Amino acid sequence: MGKIVLMKQNRPSFQIVLKYALLQIPSLIFLILALIVLRQWFDIPAYLAVGFIGLWAAKDVILFPFLWRYYDADQFPDRFAMVNRTGLAISRLEPDGYVQVRGERWWARTAETGKPIERGKCIRVKNIEGLKLTVEPSTEGNRIS
């Protein structure tokens, strides 16, 4: 199996900045609408409402350097390349249990619910559903990838 090279970026592209900014708009609109309603119910000065909006926007700007990599789909291209990887059952799977694949512990379910997989046996990943792996016994012996 070929090695996948990670293409980490040091700076966000324009598309990532745009995606981040567009995803912040709904919460900003909600804040503005909430402040409009609050100004009608309570006597909140306009400068205070504008200040809240400014703080909200500043929060998004401050958090961007920490979050932009999560908006980049190409940051870690092999993150879903677990299918067909082999690992080790670290608990008995009947049908659920824990496995270790690529040094990480995962919650897993056996592909065939009638056949448990014993602790210490090699497994192969068949599918990923969210954070749960579907696995089957590996026929490659003790070779773990």
Image (cartoon, rainbow, N blue to C red):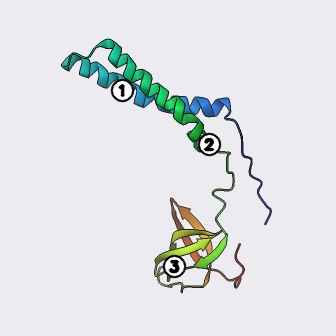
Question: Which label belongs to residue 69?
Answer: 2
Viewer-closest of 112 and 117: 117
Question: Which label belongs to residue 31?
Answer: 1
Viewer-closest of 40 and 54: 54
| Residue 62 in the figure: left or right of residue 3 | left
- Against 63, residue 91 (above or below) is below
Q: Nearer the viewer, mark 3 or mark 1?
A: 1
Q: Position of residue 124 (x, y in %)?
A: 63, 75
Is label 3 in contact with label 1 (beta carbons under 8 Å)? no
Q: Residue at x 72, y 46 (%)?
A: 8
Q: Residue at x 54, y 84 (%)?
A: 117
> Count of labels shown?
3
First in sequence: mark 3 or mark 1? 1
Q: Amino acid at mark 3?
A: Glu
Q: Is residue 110 visible?
A: no
> Please, which residue is most extreme toward the left here?
41
Numbered disc 1: secondary structure: helix
- Alpha carbon of mark 1 to alpha carbon of mark 2: how far? 26 Å
Numbered disc 2: secondary structure: helix
Question: Which label belongs to residue 111?
Answer: none
Is label 1 in contact with label 2 (beta carbons under 8 Å)? no
Q: Residue at x 70, y 85 (%)?
A: 141
Q: Position of residue 35 (x, y in %)?
A: 30, 22
- Alpha carbon of mark 3 to alpha carbon of mark 1: how far? 49 Å
Q: Amino acid at mark 1?
A: Leu
Numbered disc 3: secondary structure: loop
Q: Quadrant of the C terminus?
A: bottom right
Q: Position of residue 139 (x, y in %)?
A: 68, 83
| Residue 51 in the figure: left or right of residue 83 | left
